[in-house]
Image: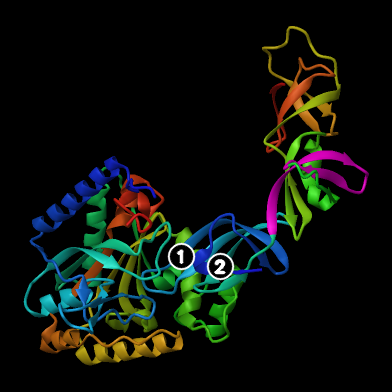
Amino acid sequence: MANYSSNEFKSGLKVMLEGDPCSMVDVEFVKPGKGQAFTRVRMKNLKTGRVWDRTFKSGESIEAADVMDLNMEYLYTDGEFWHFMLTDGTFEQYGADASAVGDSIKWLKEQEVYVVTLWNDAPIAVLAPNFVDLEVTETDPGLKGDTAQGGSKPAILATGATVRVPLFIEQGEFLKIDTRSGEYVSRA
Amino acid sequence: MPWQPSADIHLLKQRAKVINQIRAFFDARDVLEVDTPVMSRYGVSDPNIDSIPVTFTPDGASIGTSMYLMSSPEYAMKRLLAAGSGCIYQIAKAFRNGEAGRRHNPEFTLLEWYRLDFNLEQLMQEVACLIDTVLAGEVLEWHFWSYRQAFEEVLSIDPLTASDDAIKAKALAHVDIQMDDCTPRDTWLDLLMSHCIEPQLPTACFIYDYPASQAALARTGLDEWGNKVARRFEVYVNSIELANGYHELTDPQEQERRFALDNVARNTMGKVPMDAEVRLIGALQAGLPECSGVALGVERLLMLASGEKDIAKVMAFNHHLA
């Protein structure tokens, strides 16, 4: 792979650091009026999700990572791998393991499209869309006429995730969930 | 290619207003506005600042003269001071190679001024007054910390007396970076300053009495504990460096020695040496009056006044659009 020099650093650049693929979240050129210049990067490890600040000397270079974010449709799981298919018409399939799927496992729904991060052609991360519609499989019976009142109750969704929902929600309803916060938004 | 400016027009109006405020500020204090060349035969020797080289070719000549776009008007303004100008200020375009980012543009505006018979303390008060004038309405509570005090408050280490190894260990404990073994002490101190101390400074803060090794063109002296320090200050507001001031060095021999030391440092860093600005030495030999001087980044001040986080937003066209 190619190398990037500190002057080419920018947000979104994918690089190799200590053997792991990382993404630059934010890049800042730091230079005191009298003093040496540095490039300070907020770095995210794409395998572990760890975010930290790494500083580079001017002119320091770093290896590029063969990382791609691709849209893929979720198909099924065999218990060990979660299988996705490219939406670009090639029908090419990839199996992601539990560590790659991570927290997104709570929002995996067949036929929904996810962003799958490939490193050296293998999935290392799965990002759910900001909102998914999921069916309520289990919750206490709804309270009629209570639509304006506050209060909430737990509901288990088709994916196994538990979210807090308003009291009027019934089993079998489809709900719009914000996957970033894991919160109920509205009825779908 | 976009043709539009990087700044909104209302910010350019604010910029014009601030420039007028600056002129009125110095007019009221009887400080003379001057205008020195942006292109000069001698660039700056400071190892951490790179001048942008240009070539002037006289009509008909086959070989041109190497010149530089000035990184600050300091050398020329000191020649004016030695020639009897009295107190002077300048709103100058300055150029620094390599510097581009959210707080840096390779071409920017420096407000530089010199006050005869001012010590560092008096100049710091005047800088605070100018910033207060531009930020009319906002009341800043100014703090004055020595460099030593800042390190002791934030990092519990004495930057003047701690061993090189202790400074290095402190930096590596706080900053994730890979450095060569031969990295000089001042680089570790710079790392601690920019990564650990700046974010922890009071909202409006002067830092003064730098390590003597970071004197640049400031004179040195002894602090109250007998440590040799550079009579220099920097101004930070919201953790952003706004200005850099000196009690000016007037000794021509010491000035020559510093030019030579700069080139030794440049050599170690793999940078080309810079010829010493001999006319500055000449001016110092003739006699630079006792004075203090300061350079303030006008765009940084505008960022502060407008709340903008990106320098491009306070200049008509940043370097991508220039």
Q: How is the image coloured?
A: rainbow
Point out which mark residue B142 bears. none
**Residue B153 place in picture, x, y as percent:** 48, 66
Task: Let me know if residue A83 is in the magenta part.
Answer: yes
Instruction: Identify which residue, A26 or B135, lies in the foreground.
Output: A26
- The part of the image, by quadrant, that contains residue B13 is top left
Q: In which quarter of the image is residue B283?
A: bottom left
Q: Position of residue B87 (x, y in %)?
A: 11, 69
Q: Name the residue under label 2.
A: A55
What residue is shown at x 15% (from left), y 77% (from top)? Answer: B59
In the image, B136 versus B163, the foreground residue is B136
Tell me residue A110's x, y (percent).
82, 34
Q: Is residue B114 magenta?
A: no
Which quadrant, please, contains the C terminus of chain B? Answer: bottom left
For badge 1, the amino acid type reads Val
Any part of residue A133 in sight: yes
Please tell me in which quadrant of the rendered image residue B120 appears: bottom left
Q: Residue furthest top?
A: A145
Above or below for B232 versus A122: below
Q: Is residue B84 above or below residue A70?
A: below
**CB under 8 Å between discs 2 and 1:** yes
At 45% from the left and 79% from the top, the residue drawn is: B186
- Chain of the residue displaying label 2: A
Give the side of residue B64 with respect to residue B288, left or right: right
Horizontal relation, residue A120 to residue B196: left or right: right
Amino acid type assigned to the residue bearing label 2 in the image: Thr
Q: Which residue is drawn at 19% across and 52% down?
A: B19
- What is the number of the mark on residue A30? 1
B118 lies left or right of B263: left
